[in-house]
Each structure stands twice: as C-alpha cells, then as structure tokens.
Image: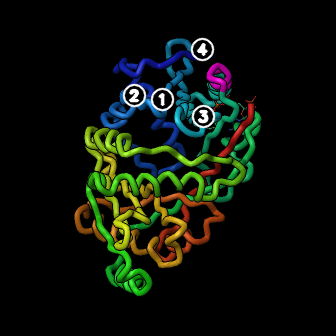
C-alpha cells in the first residue's frame, strides 16, 4: 500500500478522494448528508496560513482507496496535529488505514509535533466498534466523547416562544440580541473573536489540553469570504452587552450549499462573566427562528456536545434535540 500526497489542484484525484471520503462517512449512517464536491473543493484549495491542511492518499495499485487529512495549527496549539483517516468501505481491512496513520505519525515528527488528535463517528452503544479498535491498535487513547444530537425542524413556535420568554426574564434590559447573516459587522468582530477564542478552553474536552485559540477579525473575514465562495450561509446570533457594546455570547449555524436539508450547529458560548442569565438559550432560540423563517428547506440541525457539558445539553434537550450517534475524540502522544 503506497501513500502519496494528494495534489488538491488535480481535479480527477480530488473527485476520487471526495468519493472515498463520502463513501466512508456514509457507511452505516443513512442520515449522513455530505457537502457537495464543489464546496469541498473550494475548501481544499483555500490556503489557511493559520492552519495549513494536507491530504495523503493510500493507493492500492492505481486505485485511491483511503484518504488522510491533517491540519497543522500554526498560531495556537502548535504541539498538535488534527487529523482524519477515511478508508473506502470496499477496501477496508487491507492495511490502508494503518499505512495512512504511519504516514501521519511520520509527518507529525517532521513538523516537531507531539500530539495527534482525531475523532470518529460511532453508534451510541459501541464500546467494541471497529473504528475504536483501529484507533486503540494504533496507540490512541480515548480522551472525551461528544454526543451527536439532531433536531427535527420546524420546532413548534410555542416551544420556541416559551423558551425565549423564560430566558428573556433574566437578560432583558442589560443586553440586546442581534442576528447577522454572513458574519457580524466589523465593529462587533473584535469582541466576537475574543469570545470565540474561549470555546476551545471552556468547552469540556477530557484530557486533551487545548490552548485558547487566536482568531482575529482579519482571519474571521477570510473565513467569511471562503464560506461565500462555497455558497454557504452562516447565521450568527450574538448577545451584545449594552453597557460596553461588546459581544458576550454567540451561536453559529452553518448551512452547507450542497446538503440542502441540514444545518450544522457550530459554536455556542457565553462569556464567563455573563453566565447564569440564560443568554445561551436566548441566542439559540433567536438563531433557530431565523433559520426556520428564512430557510424552510432545512429539515434538521446537527449538533455535538461533550457528555459532561450538562448546561449545553440541557438547553438542547429542552429544544427537542435527540441522540443519534457518538463522536469520541482520541489522542496519541508521540
Ligand atoms: C478505521 C478505518 C480507517 C480503518 O481502515 P482500514 O484500512 O480498514 O484499517 P487497517 O486494515 O489498517 O486495520 C488495522 C487494524 O485496525 C483494527 N481494525 C480495523 N477494522 C476492524 C474491524 N472491522 N474489526 C476489528 N478490528 C478492526 C484491526 O486491529 C486491524 O488490524 P488487523 O486487520 O491486522 O486485525 C476505516 O474503518 C474507516 O475509514 N472508518 C471510518 C473513519 C474512521 O473512523 N477513522 C478512524 C480515525 S482514527
């Protein structure tokens, strides 16, 4: 089994890499709705200086059968490599996955990185699942587990109304809510980035120690431009503290262009100094309302929360999210 770097500008190889990744992620997951090849290519060809990406292929003769993607954070968490290994279901158990992991370990060494981090998708009752066995066989240890929940849309207006009113009693007067499509305006970006940078440290992540991230308004704008080129819609609701004009809470929904019935819940965070005022529920309900009003084609929201994140989980359960699968994170120290 040979591993080679994938040229992200080679249309033919990229189309096959996409096919391999989608077949692997679709396997035994009928609900999985992948983004389109077109929006995926935009992402693969975008050079993110803060987190360069590389894709490695495993070839069985002339056939590409597995793909490993690695990301190298450059301005925070610089001892780590994030990665993802996917092998086409028709080509598993022939050492493609192992060859890719070996390649990644080698690359991590070359880059002077000490920790490999990955996550995988398994059914709820899955202690002995093949993907876990594969990771363990390669020296990875379970770090923490996110529970993936789906929310069927639309959520009844009386549920949203009840939750919104319940929350409003606590925050009204001191904060205002704003929903923005395609990113927040420049004056809110510095405080939004500061809050977003807390997510990696504040959300529970087991024994992987993440550093605070270093998102800046410049990079935020760069990502917004990338999403526009992908035809994606980003819905962001923020809570602005009236006294300071700063964003103190946010939630993001991402609507992929090629997966028209799904919306991905990205981050939600309330700044430490402003917790306990139900701002988390407030921003989520407001964003969901905008999603339902403007995008009736979206049939579900997909979200993941650490199983120990009781606060976020209870908000999601109150809104009607239900468990579908697990996303355990594994790490290996080199
Ligand atoms: C996990 C995955 C990458 C394995 O790819 P693969 O090419 O089949 O892996 P390999 O053939 O190199 O398997 C190496 C070892 O992993 C373990 N393993 C892999 N699949 C297994 C299975 N179905 N049952 C039991 N053990 C399994 C075995 O120990 C195996 O060694 P063996 O064949 O000598 O017994 C593949 O199933 C996949 O793409 N899954 C979806 C994505 C994912 O979960 N990636 C893992 C990220 S770490």
What secondary structure characterizes most of the magenta part? helix
Q: Residues within 10 Å of mark 4 (few under 14, many from 20)?
A: some
Q: Nearer the viewer, residue 161 or 32?
A: 161
Residue range in magenta is 105-112
**Which comes sooner in the sequence, label 4 or label 2?**
4
Q: Which residue is mark 4?
A: 2
Q: In the image, is the residue at mark 3 within 8 Å of ligand 1 by its beta carbon? A: no
Q: CA distance from mark 2 to mark 1?
A: 6 Å
Tag 1 near tag 4, CB within 8 Å: no
Q: Residue 324 at what x, y percent from top left? A: 54, 60
Q: Which residue is mark 2?
A: 47
Q: Which residue is mark 1?
A: 52
**Which comes sooner in the sequence, label 2 or label 1?**
2
**Which comes sooner in the sequence, label 3 or label 1?**
1
Q: Residues within 10 Å of mark 3 (few under 14, many from 20)?
A: some
Tag 4 near tag 2, CB within 8 Å: no
Q: Nearer the viewer, residue 273 or 276?
A: 273
Q: Residues within 10 Å of mark 1 (few under 14, many from 20)?
A: few
Task: Name the residue at 29% across, 47% down.
Answer: 232
Is residue 171 visible to the viewer in this orientation of the structure?
yes
What secondary structure is marked by label 3? loop
Q: Which numbered disc, 1 or 4, marks the residue closer to the eye? A: 1
Q: Quadrant of residue 326?
A: bottom right
Q: Which numbered disc, 3 or 1, marks the residue closer to the eye? A: 3
């Amino acid at each position: 089994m040979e591993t080679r770097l994938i040229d992200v500008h080679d249309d033919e190889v990229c189309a096959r890499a996409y096919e391999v990744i989608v077949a692997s992620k679709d396997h035994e997951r009928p609900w999985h709705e992948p983004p389109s090849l077109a929006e995926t290519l935009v992402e693969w060809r975008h050079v993110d200086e803060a987190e360069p990406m590389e894709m490695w292929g495993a070839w069985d003769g002339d056939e590409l059968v597995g793909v490993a993607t690695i990301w190298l954070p450059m301005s925070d968490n610089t001892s780590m490599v994030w990665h993802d290994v996917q092998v086409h279901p028709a080509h598993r158990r022939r050492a493609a996955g192992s060859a890719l992991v070996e390649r990644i370990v080698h690359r991590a060494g070359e880059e002077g990185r000490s920790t490999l981090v990955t996550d995988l998708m398994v059914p709820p009752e899955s202690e002995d699942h093949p993907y876990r066995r594969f990771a363990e066989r390669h020296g990875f240890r379970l770090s923490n587990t996110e529970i993936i929940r789906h929310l069927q849309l639309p959520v009844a207006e009386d549920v949203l109304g009840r939750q919104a009113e319940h929350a409003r009693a606590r925050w009204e007067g001191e904060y205002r809510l704003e929903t923005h499509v395609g990113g927040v305006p420049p004056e809110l970006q510095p405080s939004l980035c500061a809050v977003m940078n807390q997510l990696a440290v504040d959300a529970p992540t087991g024994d992987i120690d993440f550093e605070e991230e270093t998102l800046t308004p410049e990079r935020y704008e760069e990502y917004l431009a990338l999403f526009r080129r992908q035809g994606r819609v980003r819905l962001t609701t923020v809570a602005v503290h009236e006294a300071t004009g700063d964003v103190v809470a946010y939630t993001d929904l991402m609507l992929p262009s090629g997966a028209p019935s799904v919306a991905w819940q990205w981050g939600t965070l309330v700044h430490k100094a402003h917790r306990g005022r139900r701002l988390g529920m407030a921003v989520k309900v407001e964003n969901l309302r905008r999603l339902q009003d403007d995008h009736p084609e979206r049939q579900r929201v997909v979200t993941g929360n650490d199983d120990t994140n009781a606060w976020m989980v209870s908000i999601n359960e109150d809104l009607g999210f239900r468990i579908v699968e697990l996303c355990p994170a594994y790490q290996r120290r080199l």
